[in-house]
Amino acid sequence: MSEIIADKKVVKLQYVLTDAEGTEIDKSHPDHPLLYLHGAQNIVPGLERQLAGKTVGDVVKAVVPAAEGYGEKRGFKDIRLNRSQFPADAHLAAGMRFMSQGQDGRMFPLFVKKVQGPTVIVTPEHPLAGVELHFDCTILEVRDATEEELEHGHAHGPHGHGHGHGEEEEGDEDDHGHAH
């Protein structure tokens, strides 16, 4: 009997993400499916909720309202930064995510909207805020998470700990269903 998707399970799936008009936003690569730890907030809450209870082979077509995806647009003002505030070798492009530290010491994400010469325009609003997300997912594998995965709060790839080695993780900003 196949495992059922529930908290503390590692799920491997292929997905295509589109907007309400059917425009493709993102998709997993056939050789690199999305791997995530269910219940650990590695993917948007609306998708995670709709995957619960599914099993290997299931095809899930999930419509996720903006509020259960990357949130509603909150109308943040753009922030203009000087290019010199970034590492010299940083390749900055629209949609790129980076972490910044607030005056209170807390870390928060910023997203590059545009690079104009020496000016980098950023926003704290995710590029997909306000967007209804349409996921077409095929469940490939469901297994128990290892103790290490549970401790770290995310799934590890087939070659062990996957930080920075092609596995999507929360915080990687291709993380549209994932935590990219």
Image: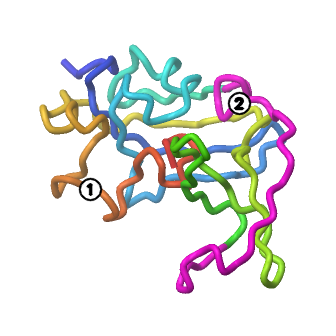
Q: Position of residue 134 (x, y in %)?
A: 68, 35
- Mark 2 packing: few (<14 Cα in 10 Å), some, or many (20+)? some
Q: Nearer the viewer, residue 74 or 79?
A: 79
Task: Report the residue at 67% width, 26% height from top.
Answer: 64
Please provide the residue range marked out in magenta: 64-92
Magenta residues: mostly which secondary structure? Answer: loop
**Three-letter amino acid code at disc 1?**
Gly
**Three-letter amino acid code at disc 2?**
Gly
Q: Position of residue 144 (x, y in %)?
A: 18, 27
Q: Closer to the N terminus: mark 2 or mark 1?
A: 2
The quarter holding residue 129 reads top right
Q: Which mark is residue 53?
A: none
Residue marked by disc 2: 71
Confirm whether the magenta stretch covers residue 82. Answer: yes
Confirm whether the magenta stretch covers residue 75. Answer: yes
Left or right: 88 in relation to 168: right
In the rendered image, the vertical position of residue 179 relative to residue 8, given as above or below:
below
User: Quarter of the image containing the N terminus?
Assistant: top left
Task: Report the residue at 20% width, 33% height from top.
Answer: 151
Residue marked by disc 1: 162
Q: Nearer the viewer, residue 34 or 169?
A: 169
Q: Position of residue 57 (x, y in %)?
A: 37, 31
